[in-house]
Image (tube, helix red, strand yellow):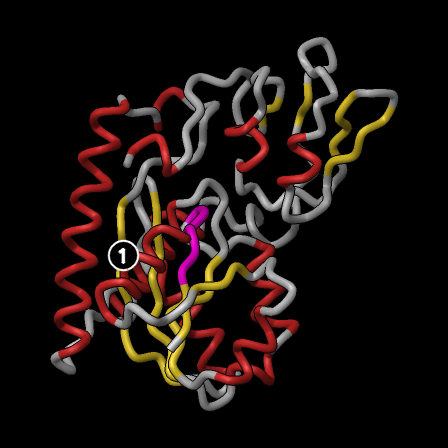
Amino acid sequence: MIGIYFSGTGNSRFCVEYFLKKLAPAAKAYSIEDENVCKELEKEKEIVLGYPVYYSSLPKILQDFLNNHAPLWKGKKIYLIATMGLFSGDGTGVAARRLKKYGAQITGGLHLKMPDCITDVKLLKKSTEENKKMVSRAKRKIERAAVLYKQGKPTEEGLNVLYHLAGLFGQRLYFPNKTKSYTDQLKIDENKCIGCGKCVKLCPMKNITLKQDKAVPGNTCTMCYRCINHCPKQAITLIGKRVLQQGTIEKYM
């Protein structure tokens, strides 16, 4: 067994690693950005796949990863973990339907509420203490899920038709194009930017470059908010106009 994940601020990575720790301590987890991830996928039959949910859909970077490596999923047994800040609907289901087309067997699904990575929308912000409690609740849920998996009764959150309808009518119908393509809406305030290059190194899409000691965004942002949460000058925004509260999983442990 191995874990595979895509993670913007560390939530999905943490959840996959914690699940493996409780289920199969010797198992390792790999980011889809790891150059060895496909080689490791080829070796293993049992996979735990974790990722965040955006607008009840998969991040575009993960969609592309699943599609571009379609032959690797044939015959795999995959347990899905979806993380979200507020609402997921069929967070695991959106990946399950795609993976089944590629010949995978879905062994279960788990939905976990985690601190929201969107730092520039006031409505989504919670206090540090609230986020710490949220992570503690997620850990307990993961522990229960690991026990059930060992007992041969894995959780199946997000996988039936009711979840599918919840995801469809909850968000996807109202935001149909949000994750169908990458976005060019990432904004970097050149007056705040100090040209440290941190965002350039962190971006999973290589969507940010340095020009004349200033960070410049491209048009292939996957909305992971990684750069926004790590920028030391809070110079980067995406949905909102200013950064309200930065945070990564380490802050809430």
Q: Mark 1 = which residue?
A: 111
Instruction: Say which quadrant the N terminus sits in.
Output: bottom left
12 relative position to 231: left or right: left
202 relative position to 239: left or right: right
Q: Quadrant of residue 115?
A: top left
Label 1 environment density (alpha carbons within 10 Å; few <14, some 14–19, many ≥20): many
Is residue 190 shown above or below 69? above
Relative image position of residue 213 (x, y in whole percent): 82, 20
Q: Secondary structure at mark 1?
A: strand
Is residue 188 shown above or below 204? above
Is residue 218 shown above or below 231? below
Please report the residue visible at 41 percent of the width from the left and 20 percent of the height from the top.
Answer: 245
Extreme-top residue of the structure: 191
Residue 197 or residue 53, whichever sits in front: 197
Please report the residue visible at 52 percent of the width from the left and 83 percent of the height from the top.
Answer: 102
Amino acid type at circle 1 is: His
